[in-house]
Image: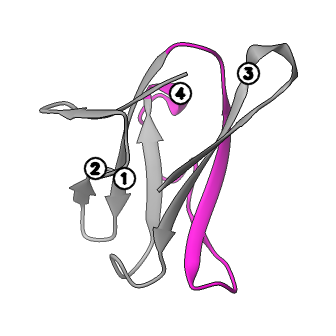
Amino acid sequence: MLKRTLLFGRKTRVTFVLPLDRPSGVVSVVGDFNNWCPGSHELLCRRDSTRTVSVILPPGVHRFRYLASGDVWFDDETADRIDHHGSLIHL
């Protein structure tokens, strides 16, 4: 799930949220905003049985995917669009 919070200066805080048990192991969000660098934005466990990470992004279209342990790539079903290159979010 994606949560968006509009910030001063037209930037948006995007919080990436996944259930704690899906998938198991370490998960990070990678995309054009972190040069597709795994581990830069690792989702951390919360008390409400979710894991999250927040990223502040400028206006525009951003592409991302999740990377889980074992080199498992997957998309966000709540993204604005998903194509054969991954998930897209429009800000």
Task: Give me the residue at 69% from left, 86% from top.
Answer: 47
Magenta residues, start to end: 32-60
Q: Residues within 10 Å of mark 4 (few under 14, many from 20)?
A: some
Left or right: 56, with 88 as reference point: right
Q: Residues within 10 Å of mark 2 (few under 14, many from 20)?
A: some
Gap between marks 1 and 3 measured at Cα: 22 Å
Look at the image and tell me whether residue 1 can be seen: yes
Q: Earlier in the sequence, mark 2 or mark 1?
A: 1
For marks 1 and 3, give the one nearer the viewer.
Answer: 3
Q: Which mark is residue 11?
A: 3
**What's the distance in space between the residues labelled 2 and 1, CA to CA?**
6 Å
Where is residue 36? Give x, y as percent. 41, 35
Q: If the image is split into quadrants, where does the C terminus sit?
A: top right
As helix, strand or loop, the secondary structure at mark 1 comes to strand
Residue at 53% across, 32% down: 34
* Marker disc for residue 66: 1
Upstream in sequence: badge 4 or badge 1: 4
Q: Amino acid at mark 4?
A: Phe
Q: Earlier in the sequence, mark 3 or mark 4?
A: 3
Q: Which residue is mark 4?
A: 33
> What kind of element bears circle 4?
helix
Tell me the residue that label 2 is attached to. 75
* Numbered tag placed on residue 24 in the rendering: none
Determine contact: label 2, label 1, CB under 8 Å: yes
The structure residue drawn at horizontal position 34% and vertical position 56%, both measured from the top left corner, is: 67
Q: Nearer the viewer, mark 2 or mark 4?
A: 2
